Image: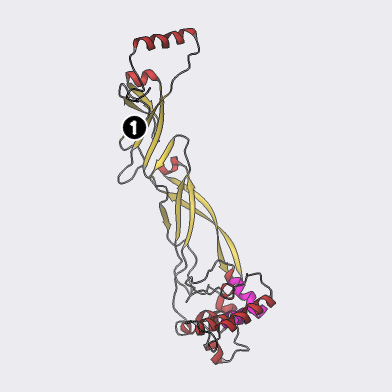
Amino acid sequence: MEFKDYYKILGVDPGASQDEIKRAYRKLARKYHPDVSSEADAEARFKEVGEAYEALKDPEKRARYDQLKNSGWSQGEEFRPPPGWTDGGGSTRGFDPEDLAGFSDFFSSLFGDGMGRGQRRRTNVRQPGRDRHARVEIDLETAFNGGVRRLTMAHAEFDEQGRVRQVPEQIDVRIPAGVADGQQIRLAGKGEPGFNGGPPGDLYLEVTIKPHRLYDIHGRDLHLTLPIAPWEAALGGKIPVPTPAGKVEMNIPAGSSSGKRLRLKGRGLPGNKPGDQYVILKVVVPEAKTARQRELYEALKKESDFNPRAGMEGL
């Protein structure tokens, strides 16, 4: 059965007064009355509005409904009465049996004998609990090497009177090496408890990798901007480059310019197909702080015929 948001059906806020609820009901009842309305779904809407008002006009019923709604249910969501709800049960006092039959299974599960009409024939059916979803934030080093994160989470439970309470729970999460940003980790049986002895749901954790001071993360690939000196760019040679697994020597081709991209195969995040690490060169020009340094720059200027703006017309 579907959860019904009676406040939304009447178009009022959950904090609305009883007078506001009554006025909203009367307005909608006139609008959708089958004898006067030309709307195609007038009869269904009229019944829905009447059911919502029946649930909210009585403070006791409304308080019972609010306990359930405040635990996170929303309109149209597949609804299963929580464990212990039927024990706290409602009562059929004041209802004609034919009137009660005119309401939805959801209404009957709250205010009838504690169960909807369909459920009366399935009292022993085991229903699985709902899945839970959350996020876990890790650093790049944990994504690369794996590890364990301890999370403290809260989930709703219902006591024998149907009251909602938030119960804290500590969960140790094993982070597999090579987990990617946005990937989900499934923890079986860590969701909400099942109904009538049914199995619990699962917990799905979406992994978020924190920004790193050196690397940009692209799936399993890593991008590193590597500063180099002008002579390293001009002459080439081997330069130490950081990777998550430690430093490696990388060959810089002679005549390299800023923006040149080099690849360290398999040096990204591990996996069935490991990612790569891409190194983007950035030539950093030192300032001429002494007369000798300036003299060397002047000598290079005279000796070189290099024009960085060759091909740009008008310059």
Report the side of 149 relative to 27 (left or right): left
Magenta-drawn stretch, dominant element (helix, strand or loop): helix
Q: Amino acid at mark 1?
A: Arg
Q: Where residue 100 sits: x, y (%)?
A: 55, 88
Q: Is residue 4 left or right of residue 251?
A: right
Name the outermost residue toward the front: 314
Residue plotted at (45% across, 73% down): 127
Question: Which of these two is toward me, 45 or 185?
Answer: 45
Residue 279 in sight here: yes
Picture layout, residue 149 above or below residue 86:
above
| Residue 160 seen by the camera | no
Rendered residue at 55%/87% (across/down): 36
- Magenta stretch holds residue 56: yes
Specify the segment rendered in magenta.
Answer: 50-68
Residue 122, percent from left and from top: 45, 82
Query: Residue at 39% across / 19% down in the picture?
Result: 230
| Circle 1 residue | 261
**Residue 264 painted magenta:** no
Q: Residues within 10 Å of mark 1 (few under 14, many from 20)?
A: some
Left or right: residue 275 compared with residue 33: left
Q: How has the structure been colored for display?
A: secondary structure
Q: Nearer the viewer, residue 220 or 270?
A: 220
Q: Secondary structure at mark 1?
A: strand
Residue name at image x 44 percent, y 75 percent: 126
* Percent of width and height locating residue 173: 46, 52
Where's residue 290, x and y in %?
50, 10
Task: Tell me where residue 255 sits by quadrant.
Answer: top left
Q: Viewer-proximal residue, 133 or 54?
A: 54
- Quadrant the C terminus occupies: top left
Q: Is residue 3 above or below residue 165?
A: below
